[in-house]
Image (cartoon, helix red, strand yellow):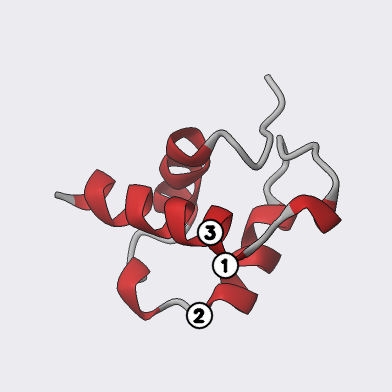
Amino acid sequence: MSLKWTDSLDIAIELDEIYPDVDPRTVNLVDLRDWVLDLPEFDDDPEHSGEKILEAIQMAWFEERD
């Protein structure tokens, strides 16, 4: 399965598994973008990310924690 920018929940789940001790509310969007790009299953154009997409991923990650 490959991940795209629009797969915010799946990306959030992956990030939560890799960074269990990180509070998603404290991650800046630059780091978040880098972390998404580093996911083994991520396969999308890095230029297609934007603030709204990254915020959606961050919110999904936060909600996944609850």
Considering every residue shown, the one lying at the far top of the view is 1
Label 1 to label 3: alpha-carbon separation: 12 Å
Q: Can you say whether 24 is above or below 15 in the image?
A: below
Measured as percent of width and height from the top left, residue 21 is found at 33, 68
Q: Amino acid at mark 3?
A: Lys
Q: Amino acid at mark 2?
A: Asn
Measured as percent of width and height from the top left, residue 27 is found at 45, 76
Label 1 to label 2: alpha-carbon separation: 6 Å
Q: Residue, x 70% and y 67% (percent of image)?
A: 34
Looking at the picture, tell me which residue is in the foreground, 46 or 22: 46
Q: Regarding mark 3 in the picture, which secondary structure is present there?
A: helix
The residue labelled by disc 3 is 52
Q: Which mark is residue 28?
A: 2
Q: Are marks 1 and 2 in contact (CB under 8 Å)?
A: yes
Q: Regarding mark 2 in the picture, which secondary structure is present there?
A: loop
Give the quarter of the image for residue 36: bottom right
The residue labelled by disc 1 is 32
Indicate which disc, 2 or 3, sits on the residue closer to the N terminus.
2
Q: Can residue 23 be seen from the camera position used here?
A: no
